[in-house]
């Protein structure tokens, strides 16, 4: 029988190989474990300024929602977005058009020994916001009265129906500790001076933000003890990371949403937070080529929006009928025109226009360029030559603004998308007469529209508000200056072990996530 | 040698000076108002005014340039537009990740590419030479971002052997090394081919030299002839290539860092460009250029030290 000889070199080699093989399971465990209380998510960039007054938004609002008190939060009433009081208050009531009473819950404590959360903190936080970059959300705020340690009244300087929805529920509605802020010098960037919520916050720039269980928190425990948010700039890289099992939930783009809708990965689901983006093709009503309303109406009838939704957005976006997004008061289910190339040709003939050549300006991203190309083909079919001019964001966002140069005079057609909050007021504010040359690039004015805009702010009855905003969109249709295109969704893919909670504008709220 | 070094240093300073000028001009060549571009279309007047003040945009351009140069010379690359953190500190946080990625990426390419090139040259036209040739050309032809995506799809998404994103847990070296495997593989792969082809060509030339024939005639062992005599001369152009490659690899890391969501200089520059965060773009590109110039200077100096003909030529 041949005896196996063990040499020193052979022994070392075999040991090294076995050691390497033995390491593989531990790698995978270390990397892919999502068990216990840890949830891994994505943020698109570092949180540079967590201060509600000077933040950029998005993931910074997400961080505030986990670590700071808010008085109100979004919820759904059937298909419509509305608000409800948070855990932090036992009462939040609109007493009349200009007074909102609140009572803070008992036992709320700031971290780092800054004591209880008080009505004075609310007063400090909201009155401070009037002097910040987000002051626009507090234009209607007159002052806050702290009537006791835990009770107070938010006093508005004029009736402003959307205040709770767009201000208290949203990022600017975060409450800060007055004492902690004084110690921090009145402003902060990447570290909360004090937190009151289920999580504490710590970030490693360029890598991740980690939300760990707050030892001082005595409120409802979140489903996940720890949330790790990896900084992943590219949405596609995050989608692959989800498929690799390294993320529990991530936002997805239109093409991936279409792919997942057809063929969902095992153990995954899709959640749509809201569709608060509205996109349209605008027309400059004062441009010599477009001054005749029949020409503008011809263009409205010439564009096949259904083809755009399929061709550029893979059928993943909702068709738009105006500036009011799905789930909001005032949303319509039809527009004042329809795709009808014959009618478009007839209107052009009636206007005596032939050989018309126009320029469409758009941001140079994939979906917009595809949209522009489809519009180009649609307009060619009715005898209009369309040149597409793709632009970088710098010149694009300035082209209609009178304060930024003379380009607004040459502006003919453009593709535009605005985002909004879950109240119709914000979407309508950009089209009033005083916005001509600012954000009303279509450059029309209408007294009834301006009056309805003020009425919409003051009106608190939901049905009456609905009627107001429907009428405002009819007025916009009648200008012939708009081709409504779509509302892009804020969609998330998540593992089946995670129930996602997100604001309608897409900010995730980890403290309201659930397991299963 | 001192004269040579002085001249090379002067040239390097000139290159960096030109880069500073281009980077500074960048802000003014991009259409649109720099403050609006950086802060977004809905920025308040107060925020725009603060930005203009911070960036000295209200000063004459020549004065802005002098301020920028003066600050850069003292290591002050300005402040991040959004967080107000010093750009220098932000770059220092990230540069280690890029250097480790480039080091490991080039390291495995050198360890594999040079021996492969030697083997191919020692046995020209053999099956080994042909296979090496095909593989080399194949890997050179595939861009690193494509390798990154394939590697990610195969090893992370499909097989789940290796992590898809991140740089590993801070402070855990083992975990950080595991997170280096895929990106280093992706950026180094094409360099295996480059180095193998370069070493093969140089070796074939050197192997035909008289002194190599003499060494063989004296009966020296083939390993000694190849590695002790031939490779020492043949490696010179490869050192230049590695120096240049180091710079090229810093560019390649942009894709790898984005695809694998790794922190680093490349991802920092990409994110800053996307956010129109000009101080970060200027600072990070300047540091990347400085690194590139330093490595090329080092490789040139190394060659000059090895080969007196080079230092006499400048």
Image (cartoon, rainbow, N blue to C red):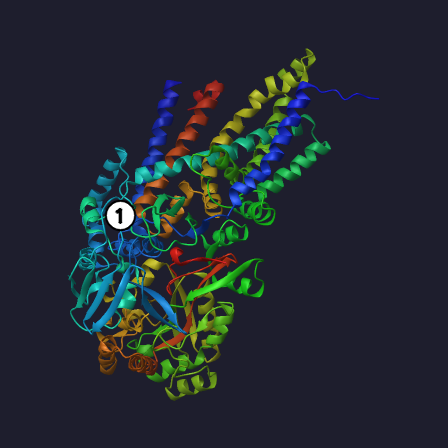
Q: Is residue B6 above or below residue A169?
A: above
* Residue B228, image x, y percentages: 60, 17
Q: Nearer the viewer, residue B251 or A418?
A: A418
Residue most extreme to the top: B218
Q: Is residue A339 above or below residue A90?
A: below
Residue drawn at (25%, 69%) of the image: A93
Q: Nearer the viewer, residue A155 or B241?
A: A155
Residue drawn at (26%, 66%) of the image: A91
* Residue B9, image x, y percentages: 35, 27
* Residue A232, image x, y percentages: 43, 49
Please tell me how crowded label 1 is: few (under 14), some (14-19), or many (20+) other residues with Cα within 10 Å. Answer: many
Q: Is residue A6 above or below residue A500?
A: above
Residue drawn at (59%, 22%) of the image: B231
Q: Residue under mark 1: which chain is it in?
A: A
Q: Can you see residue A240?
A: yes
Q: Can you see residue A403?
A: no
What quarter of the picture does the N terminus of chain A occupy?
A: top right
Q: Quadrant of residue A364?
A: bottom left
Left or right of B131, for residue B27: left
Q: Nearer the viewer, residue A469 or A479?
A: A469
* Residue B254, image x, y percentages: 45, 44
Left or right of B79, for residue A349: right
Q: Nearer the viewer, residue A255 or A398?
A: A255
| Number of numbered tags placed on the structure image | 1
- Helix, strand or loop at mark 1: loop
| Mark 1 lies on residue | A194
Residue most extreme to the front: A106
């Amino acid at each position: 029988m041949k005896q196996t000889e063990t040499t020193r070199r052979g022994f070392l080699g075999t040991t090294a190989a076995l050691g390497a093989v033995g390491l593989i399971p531990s790698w995978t465990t270390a990397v892919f474990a999502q068990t216990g209380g840890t949830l891994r998510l994505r943020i698109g960039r570092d949180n540079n300024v967590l201060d509600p007054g000077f933040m950029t938004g998005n993931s910074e609002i997400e961080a505030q929602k986990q670590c700071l008190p808010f008085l109100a939060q979004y919820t759904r009433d059937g298909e419509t977005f509305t608000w409800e009081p948070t855990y932090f208050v036992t009462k939040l009531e609109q007493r009349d058009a200009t007074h909102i009473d609140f009572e803070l819950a008992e036992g709320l404590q700031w971290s780092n020994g800054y004591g209880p959360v008080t009505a004075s903190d609310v007063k400090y936080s909201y009155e401070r916001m009037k002097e910040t970059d987000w002051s626009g959300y507090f234009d209607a705020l007159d002052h806050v009265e702290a009537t006791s340690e835990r009770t107070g009244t938010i006093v508005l300087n004029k009736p402003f129906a959307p205040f709770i929805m767009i201000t208290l529920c949203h990022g600017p509605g975060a409450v800060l500790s007055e004492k902690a802020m004084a110690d921090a010098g009145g402003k902060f960037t990447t570290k909360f001076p004090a937190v009151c919520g289920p999580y504490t916050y710590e970030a490693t720039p360029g890598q991740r933000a980690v939300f760990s269980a707050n030892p001082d928190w005595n409120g409802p425990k979140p489903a996940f003890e720890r949330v790790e948010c990896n900084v992943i700039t590219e949405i596609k890289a995050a989608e692959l990371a989800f498929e690799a099992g390294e993320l529990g939930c991530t936002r997805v783009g239109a093409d991936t949403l279409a792919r997942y809708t057809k063929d969902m990965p095992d153990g995954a689901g899709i959640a749509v937070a809201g569709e608060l983006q509205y996109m349209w093709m605008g027309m400059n009503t004062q441009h010599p080529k477009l001054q005749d309303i029949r020409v503008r109406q011809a263009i409205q009838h010439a564009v096949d929006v259904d083809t755009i939704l399929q061709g550029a957005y893979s059928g993943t976006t909702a068709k738009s009928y105006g500036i009011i997004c799905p789930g909001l008061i005032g949303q319509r289910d039809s527009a004042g025109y329809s795709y009808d190339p014959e009618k478009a040709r007839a209107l052009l003939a009636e206007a005596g226009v032939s050989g018309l050549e126009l320029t469409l300006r758009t941001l140079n991203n994939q979906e917009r360029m595809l949209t522009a190309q489809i519009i180009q083909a649609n307009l060619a079919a009715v005898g209009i030559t369309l040149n597409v001019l793709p632009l970088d964001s710098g010149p694009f966002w300035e082209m209609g603004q009178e304060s930024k140069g003379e380009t607004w005079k040459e502006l003919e057609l453009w593709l535009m998308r605005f985002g909004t909050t879950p109240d119709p007021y914000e979407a309508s504010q950009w089209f009033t007469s005083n916005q001509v040359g600012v954000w009303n690039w279509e450059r029309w004015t209408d007294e009834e529209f301006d009056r309805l805009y003020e009425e919409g702010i003051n009106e608190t009855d939901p049905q009456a508000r609905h009627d107001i905003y429907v009428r405002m969109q009819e007025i916009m249709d009648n200008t012939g200056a708009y081709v409504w295109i779509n509302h892009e969704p804020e969609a998330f893919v998540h593992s089946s072990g995670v129930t996602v909670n997100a604001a309608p504008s897409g900010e995730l709220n980890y403290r309201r996530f659930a397991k299963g | 040698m001192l004269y040579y070094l002085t001249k090379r240093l002067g040239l390097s300073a000139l290159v960096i000076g030109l880069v500073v000028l281009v980077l500074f001009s960048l802000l003014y060549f991009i259409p649109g108002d720099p403050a609006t571009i950086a802060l977004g279309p809905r920025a308040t007047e107060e925020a725009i005014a603060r930005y203009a003040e911070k960036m000295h945009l209200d000063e004459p351009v020549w004065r802005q340039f002098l301020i920028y140069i003066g600050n850069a010379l003292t290591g002050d690359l300005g402040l991040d537009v959004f967080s107000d953190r010093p750009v220098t500190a932000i770059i220092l946080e990230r540069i280690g990740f890029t250097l480790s990625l480039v080091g490991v990426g080039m390291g495995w390419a050198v360890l594999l590419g040079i021996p492969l090139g030697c083997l191919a040259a020692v046995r020209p036209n053999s099956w080994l030479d042909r296979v090496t040739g095909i593989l080399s050309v194949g890997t050179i032809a595939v861009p690193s971002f494509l390798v990154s995506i394939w590697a990610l799809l195969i090893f992370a998404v499909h097989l789940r052997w290796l992590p898809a994103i991140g740089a590993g847990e801070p402070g855990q070296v083992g975990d950080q090394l595991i997170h280096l495997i895929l990106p280093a593989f992706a950026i180094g792969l094409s360099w295996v081919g480059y180095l193998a082809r370069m070493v093969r060509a140089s070796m074939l030339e050197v192997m035909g030299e008289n002194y190599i024939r003499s060494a063989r005639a004296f009966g020296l062992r083939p390993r000694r002839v190849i590695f002790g005599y031939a490779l020492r001369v043949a490696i010179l152009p490869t050192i230049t290539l590695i120096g240049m490659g180091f710079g090229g690899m810093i560019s390649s890391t942009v894709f790898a860092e984005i695809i694998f969501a790794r922190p680093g200089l490349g991802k920092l520059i990409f994110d800053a460009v996307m956010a129109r965060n000009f101080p970060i773009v200027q600072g990070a590109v300047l540091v990347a250029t400085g690194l590139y110039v330093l490595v090329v200077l080092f490789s040139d100096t190394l060659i000059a030290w090895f080969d007196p003909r080079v230092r006499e030529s400048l």
